Image (cartoon, rainbow, N blue to C red):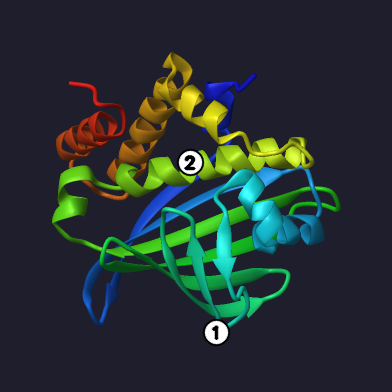
Amino acid sequence: MIDVTEQINSVRRTLGDRVLEAGQARVLTISQAYDTDLDDLWDVVTDPERIARWFLPVSGDLREGGKYQLEGNAGGTITRCDKPRSYAATWEFGGQVSWIEVRLTPEGDTRTRFELEHTALVDEHWGQFGPGAVGIGWDSGLLGLAMHVSAPNAPRDTDAIMAWLASEDGKRFMKLSGDAWAAADVASGADPETAAKQAAATYAAYTGAE
């Protein structure tokens, strides 16, 4: 059974700004600590078989300079790999390019923090939906990661996942995630009214709510 509130509260979320050659960008950072050691968590987030159990099936050449493709989602190029601490890649989806970096940090001998940084250019889509458009998806990924670490041999049941997301608990998870990203946006200096409107638009887009 998923404790939605506990999972949302176990995650850290921050937002920042960055200026790239291509223009103004926002930097979304999400992290959670898991009860496993550094080497195991590295295996969880880099081995294709394990990635498919908590996130999405992935294909390609998973090494520095190689191309990857997530089934039905983003693809890109792995631009850096520093085993077992971090890797970076482009995140190419819908004709847009953004950038991700994954960092793993030990917190004692049997606990490791997973941190993901996603840098995206500010565009019309960001203006309409704000950070939740990306953040809810990453929150879902960290939930899947938590479930995999607690039961590493359990197969991924896509039908059950989709059914849960359509349930009241799943909708509450997305609502709380969107609200948490709006709060992180406000903490970074965003206008509270704008952040609230963007969170509502994102939740509606995910759930079909009015």
Q: Residue furthest right?
A: 109
- Indicate the position of residue 29 as horizontal and vertical percent values: 46, 54
Occupied quadrant, residue 122: bottom left
- What residue sits right under mark 1 in the picture? 65
Label 2 CA crowd tier, 10 Å (few <14, some 14–19, many 20+): many
- Indicate the position of residue 71 as horizontal and vertical percent values: 48, 55
Marked residue nearer the N-terminal end (2 or 1): 1
Q: Are marks 2 and 1 in contact (CB under 8 Å)?
A: no
- Screen quadrant of the N terminus: top right
Classify mark 1: helix, strand or loop: loop
Frontmost of labels 2 and 1 is 1
Nearest to the observer: residue 32 or residue 74: 74
What residue sits 25% from the left and 82% below the top? 21
Taking 73 as reference, is 200 above or below it?
Answer: above
What residue sits 24% from the left and 29% below the top? 204
**Residue 78 left/right relative to 15:** right
**Residue 178 left/right relative to 159:** left
Residue type pointed to by label 2: Asp
Return the mark for residue 139: 2
**Residue 165 left/right relative to 151:** left
